[in-house]
Structure formats: structure tokens, C-alpha cells
Image: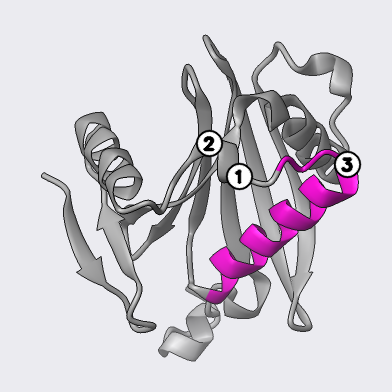
Amino acid sequence: AGYEEKNELGIFAWVLKTSEDAEKALNAFKQRGLYAESEQPLLERKDDLLIWFEEHLNAAIAQGATDIHIEPSAKVVEMRFRVDGILRFRDTLRLSCLSRLVNIIFHKAEVAVSDFGHFHDARFTHCHMNRDVDVRVSHIPSVHGSSLVLRLLDKSKAAIALTDLGYAPDH
């Protein structure tokens, strides 16, 4: 079951394990006045959406997230970060912005925009605080639009050589 927890900044976050948990969290946000579709910025220009995406990408890297999940539903697009193995709700976006967001991500990964309806695995490099982070993009078409998973791999935390672990070079 989902539960609330306070993070290091004193901000409450929901830990979600099922779609029912997500629905409960959304209702709790609405009851507290923390969520209203009409209050969400419209992100009318492509630049606004690009800035929104890069802010969330930087936040995910800063929090040590390994994945960013972008999942459309019937009304909104949910963004969640996987931190310490747990998917945590991050933000929502109007469903009408999904195709532009996918276009931005596809452009970064150099995927042809005409291939929206196909499965994709692509990648791009994002620089955050003078560190290169390899972003692997997995795209799956769904009933409500494109579902994306962005896998974040920090190149500065690359695999350790076997010799550094004490193994002989000939092994």
C-alpha cells in the first residue's frame, strides 16, 4: 500500500506501488489544494516545455534517480522518478503536451519523429553540473499515447576495473 513520507527537505512525498495508490495520492493532493488541472502552467511554447523537461531531468539526477517514467493516462501524463528502487510521484502534465514532450526527447536522442508509433530504444547525453549522464530512452506506444522510460547512467560512476577490485589482470 502507498504511504506518505517526509523527505530530507521536509516535503511530503507519496510512495506508490499500485495504480490505486496513485489514485489515492492524486485525491489527497486535490483535497489539500495542491493539485488542480486548471492551475497547471499551460506550457504553450515548445521552449517552456523544454525548460520544464530539463528542470525535471536535472532534479532526477540531483536526487540520484535511476529512472524517469513518463506515463500517459486518460486525463494526464504522470512523471515518476525511481529513487532507491522505489517509484516516486514527481509531477503531472496535461495530456495535450505529451506529443511535444516526446518530440523534445526524440530530438535529443536523434530519433525520427515520424516513428512515434513504433518501439524505440535510443540514447543521448545530458550534462548536469559538469558531469555527463547517459540517458537511455525506451519508448512504447500505449492506448493513451507514448510511454517513456529514461534510464539515467552517470558516467562518472562508471564500472570499476577488475584490477581495482584485486583481481589479477589475466583473469
- Residue stretch rendered in magenta on the structure: 42-62
Quarter of the rendering containing residue 52: bottom right
Distance (Cα) linking label 2 and label 3 = 18 Å
Q: CA distance from mark 1 to mark 2?
A: 5 Å
Q: Residue at x 74, y 36 (%)?
A: 101
Q: Residue 115: x percent and y percent?
A: 80, 16
Q: Is residue 81 above or below residue 99?
A: below
* Residue 37, numbered label: 2
Q: Residue 45's mark?
A: 3
> Residue flagged by tag 2: what amino acid is it?
Glu
Q: Do labels 1 and 2 touch, CB within 8 Å?
A: yes
**Residue 23: horizontal and vertical position, in percent?**
27, 33
Specify the principal SS of the magenta part.
Answer: helix
Assess disc 1: are there few (<14), some (14-19) or many (≥20) residues with their C-alpha within 10 Å of its C-alpha. few
Amino acid type at image mark 3: Arg
**Mark closer to the observer (3, 1):** 1
Residue pointed to by mark 1: 40
| Residue at image point 53% right, 49% down | 68
Give the quadrant of the N terminus: top left
Report the front residue among 128 and 52: 52
Q: Please, what is the three-letter code of the amino acid marked with disc 1?
A: Gln
Marks 3 and 1, Cα distance to the nearest angstrom?
14 Å
Residue extending furthest toward the left: 1
In the image, taking residue 125 as reference, residue 160 lies left or right, namely left
Give yes or no for residue 92 being in the magenta stretch. no
Q: Nearer the viewer, residue 138 or 21?
A: 21
Residue 126: % across, % down: 77, 63
